[in-house]
Image (cartoon, rainbow, N blue to C red):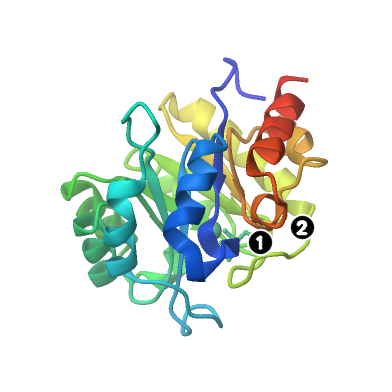
Amino acid sequence: MPKTLPTYRIAPSLLSADFARLGDELKAVIAGGADWIHFDVMDNHYVPNLTFGPMICQALKPHAKRADGTAVPIDVHLMVQPVDSLAAAFADAGADLISFHPEASSHVHRSVQAIKARGCKAGLVFNPATPLDVLDWTIDDIDLILIMSVNPGFGGQSFIDSALRKIEQARKRIEASGRDIRLEVDGGIKIDNIARVAAAGADTFVAGSAIFGKPDYKAVIDAMRAELKG
Ligand code: DX5
Ligand code: ZN
């Protein structure tokens, strides 16, 4: 657990939305209480699946707002290689946070700086078998750490338990850095495991199939928040 009580964020992943009604799905999940919108970008090269590009992000951006007009941050998770050209395109398309996998960039520090130079927050993503070592040299520069609790590429997979140990390690590194860094977890998050993941130290939760797989998005998000309070 972090030293101070975190403000939890729930980030529904549009990967599990109905792509034929993407704008309506975005509005429905925001009405249901989404804190961030998680946008999974896959290139059929770094991961074995292909999703959506910057033009779709740009089209959705004006609709990523709550009833009171406040913006809902778009949290872009790049599963692409190379990183830099698409990161720039997503910054131009209205992304608020852009995260990438360090294995997919030849120059991780440069990619982080390029994202920040475009006014976005920058994050690093760690696959289930990837150690956190790159944080030794990057933690002072990033805004977000994203721990994968499934192998990237598909929604609806089961949570990999070893991610809990990695979340604990990442939380220790964040505490030691003294910096304000979000610790996000992605893959297999459900109502019945979110409290365990929070107890390990996570403060931001991606959920795709758990939310879009049910008819009432608000009911799922409310139930997740209730678990986090408990
Ligand atoms: C997987 C994606 C996830 C995915 C999570 O590569 O990064 O964001 O949408 O889906 P669920 O919540 O269904 O495991
Ligand atoms: Zn993701």
Question: Where on the picture, by quarter, is residue 55?
Answer: bottom left
Q: Which mark is residue 128?
A: 1
- Determine whether label 1 and label 2 are within 8 Å by CB: yes
Image x and y of residue 92, in percent:
19, 58
- Residue in the foreground of this view, choosing between 181 and 207: 207
Q: Position of residue 139 (x, y in %)?
A: 40, 41
- Ligand 1, what quadrant? bottom right
Q: Determine whether the residue tagged by mark 2 lies in a helix, strand or loop.
A: loop
Q: Nearer the viewer, mark 1 or mark 2?
A: 2
Q: Is residue 57 above or below residue 31?
A: below
Q: Please tell me which residue is depicted at 31% across the width and 45% down the height of the picture.
A: 96
Q: Residue at x 68, y 56 (%)?
A: 149
Q: Quadrant of the N terminus?
A: top right
Task: State whether residue 5 is above or below residue 90.
Answer: above
Q: Secondary structure at mark 1?
A: loop
Give the side of residue 149 with respect to residue 67, left or right.
right
Instruction: Indicate if the residue with disc 1 has its beta carbon within 8 Å of ligand 1.
Output: no
Residue 2: percent from left, percent from top: 61, 23
Q: Residue at x 59, y 57 (%)?
A: 131
For disc 2, the neighbor class at 10 Å (few under 14, some 14 to 19, many from 20) is some
Query: In front here: 96 or 143?
Result: 96
Residue type marked 1: Pro
Mark 2 sits on what residue? 160
Tell me where residue 15 sits by quadrant: bottom right
Task: Look at the image and tell me whether residue 95 can be seen.
Answer: no
Separation of disc 1 and disc 2 at Cα?
8 Å
Q: Earlier in the sequence, mark 1 or mark 2?
A: 1
Q: Is residue 103 above or below residue 224?
A: below
Q: Amino acid at mark 2?
A: Ile
